Image (cartoon, grey):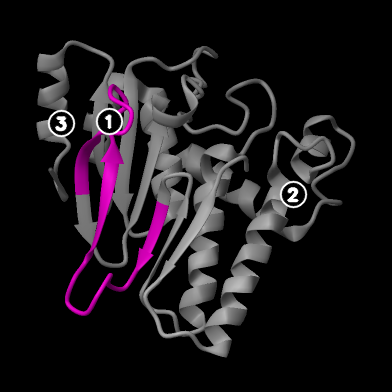
Amino acid sequence: MGTVFSFDIRHAASPPVERALRDAVALLHHVDELFSTYRPDSAVSRLARNETTLDQVPEMVTEVLDLCMEAERRTGGYFSTRAGGRLDPSGLVKGWAVEAASTILHRAGAHNSCVNGGGDIQCRGESAPGRPWTIGIADPRQPGRVLATVTGCDMAVATSGTAERGHHVIDPHTGVPARGLLSATVTGRHLTWADAYATAACARGTTAQEWMTRVTGYDLLAVPAEDPAQRHAEERRGRRGITR
């Protein structure tokens, strides 16, 4: 998946949790082997070249592609695995993988943890007794600066845009890079959907904020590629559940 993953586990060391951590890391490596568009031997790369079929790929691949189809339906086509003309589920699979790794830890008894995959984060429980997790959101205009923070328990935070990878989101309806937003950060309970919604929001551009008001359980902080006055207005409208 071409990114760095980290684990913050607020739980006493124990054999079950240590095994779960190893299993979570192994899962992320396996997901990379199956879904990386940079590996010519991955299942997704072979599917894209028509060298294999959905009947022949591992069940995990069909599960994720089914979720991608559902994401496309939910977003009116602004999430798409073929926006760039070639099969690429990256806009959902990283969030799905991080959430799955977090679930492995949770089921082993690590009820307070935070898994971070390149800035897409799934938090469980609390950072300390009675204290929620606090996550910083990067400012795409000023690398290294925190634009806002979001706090909560059992929450997910996903960002799509230019902060890490440049103009990588394609508008599926036009086939060209989406440039209406510099970044879109979505918060909610499940990282799988936060990731997909963030990708779709970036593709939608300036209409994303209004669209997200109709998505139950998820909030958006959008940074438009416009003048500062409009940027601040968008931030104010998108700050539900998000604090500076």
The percent position of residue 8, horizontal first and vertical second, equals: 42, 66
Seen in the picture, residue 36 relative to 206 is either above or below; the reply is below
- Range shown magenta: 121-149
Q: Is residue 84 above or below residue 20?
A: above
- Measured in 3D between alpha carbons, the distance from the residue under mark 1 to the one under mark 3, in whole angstroms, is 12 Å
Badge 3 is on which residue?
235
The span from disc 3 to disc 2 (Cα, nearest Å) is 37 Å
Helix, strand or loop at mark 3: helix
Q: Amino acid at mark 3?
A: Glu
Would residue 149 be found to the left or right of residue 158 on screen? left
Circle 3 crowding by C-alpha within 10 Å: few under 14, some 14–19, many from 20:
some
Numbered disc in front, either 1 or 3: 1
Decide which of tag 1 and tag 3 comes sooner along the chain.
1
Disc on res. 34 = 2
- The residue that mark 1 highlights is 139
Quadrant in the rendering for residue 115 = bottom left
